[in-house]
Image (tube, grey):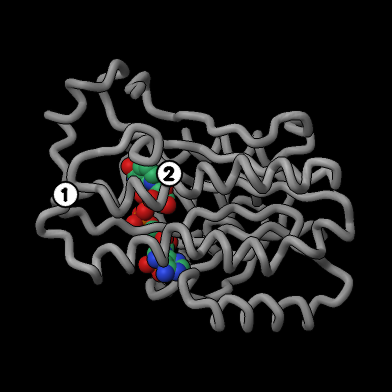
Amino acid sequence: MRYALVTGGSRGIGRAISLKLGEMGYHVLVNYVSNEAAALQTLSLLEAAGGSGELLRFDVGDKEAVASAISSWQQAHPDAYIEVLVNNAGIRRDNLMIWLEESEWDTVLRTNLDSFYHVTRAVLQPMVLKKYGRIVNVASLSGLKGLPGQVNYSAAKGGLIAATKALAQEVARKNITVNAVAPGFISSDMTDGLDEKALSKDIPAARFGRPEEVAAVVGFLASKEASYVTGECISINGGLYC
Ligand code: NAP
């Protein structure tokens, strides 16, 4: 069995990525933090499509929780390793800088960027030993362009893109690729309160994207065929370039 871990796999983009990796034959570890009903629904959808998976609950920003969940899983599966990691879990807490609370800065950096360090560190060594791995980080247009009201989120996603490029160069010789995707506006719970009609006027494709459209690109980057693509950040934004 081949294993993939999708952080924040319970809803939205992470759910679509979990289903895509299931379709590609991976046993998917679906991570979530609080919404167990949604995580169980992802699992049901995976199984209904002929795939398999299991839930792995932990807070990606909590160093001890990540280490403990992944080492317990590894102990229960001594002969297995996670060959695909998708760092997808993320949150936003938008505010203009003059009002941006320290807690809003901390929680966004912790969940969107510290999480990359905690989770990737926990799964990287087995990939290096097995000389194969695929790491895909879900960044954002906000991390490329910077968006007003998102100084915290832009900083976290920009940091994630830079970390992607640096790590890619460290592990390329071990047949491990590290890439990022930068979605624009994608319909999900995260964009639920936004005025889609008004915002779509600035998008050449004139609509928000669908989670499946992000999952298709992540699926390619996670595939064996993408073996010579590394350190890249692919925009998925309907033409809404920086
Ligand atoms: P979403 O619908 O709000 O789903 C967020 C997912 O992340 C959920 O599965 C949630 O788990 C999980 N999560 C949140 N905090 C977590 C934590 N501390 N530990 C573990 N899991 C956690 O968001 P989405 O739109 O699918 O976004 C997915 C990723 O794409 C994020 O990194 C986001 O920044 C990025 N992105 C989204 C858009 C967009 O337009 N939607 C654009 C660019 C980038 P629970 O279900 O347990 O809460």
Residue 33 locus on image (x, y percent): 43, 73
Residue 138 locus on image (x, y percent): 49, 46
**Residue to which mark 2 is pinned:** 158
Q: Amino acid at mark 2?
A: Gly
The residue carrying mark 2 has its beta carbon less than 8 Å from ligand 1: no
Q: Amino acid at mark 1?
A: Gly
Please tell me how crowded label 1 is: few (under 14), some (14-19), or many (20+) other residues with Cα within 10 Å. few
Residue 95 locus on image (x, y percent): 16, 54
Residue at 34%, 61% in the rendered image: 108
Q: On screen, 70 above or below 231?
A: below
Residue at 26%, 22% in the rendered image: 203
Q: On screen, 74 above or below 160?
A: below
Camera-side mark, 2 or 1:
2
Q: Nearer the viewer, residue 66 or 17?
A: 66
Left/right of residue 166 with respect to residue 200 in the rendered view: right
Residue at 29%, 54% in the rendered image: 152
Q: Nearer the viewer, residue 118 or 43?
A: 118
Residue 106 locus on image (x, y percent): 32, 68
Left/right of residue 138 with respect to residue 175 in the rendered view: left
Label 2 to label 1: alpha-carbon separation? 24 Å
Ligand 1 is located in which of the four quadrants?
bottom left
Residue at 30%, 37% in the rendered image: 146
**Local secondary structure at mark 1:** loop
Please tell me how crowded label 2 is: few (under 14), some (14-19), or many (20+) other residues with Cα within 10 Å. many
Left/right of residue 171 with respect to residue 213 in the rendered view: right
**Local secondary structure at mark 2:** helix
Q: On screen, 115 above or below 186?
A: below
Q: Where, quadrant-wise, is the N terminus in this rendering?
A: bottom right
Label drawn at residue 193: 1
Quadrant hosting residue 226: top right
Q: Nearer the viewer, residue 9 or 41?
A: 9
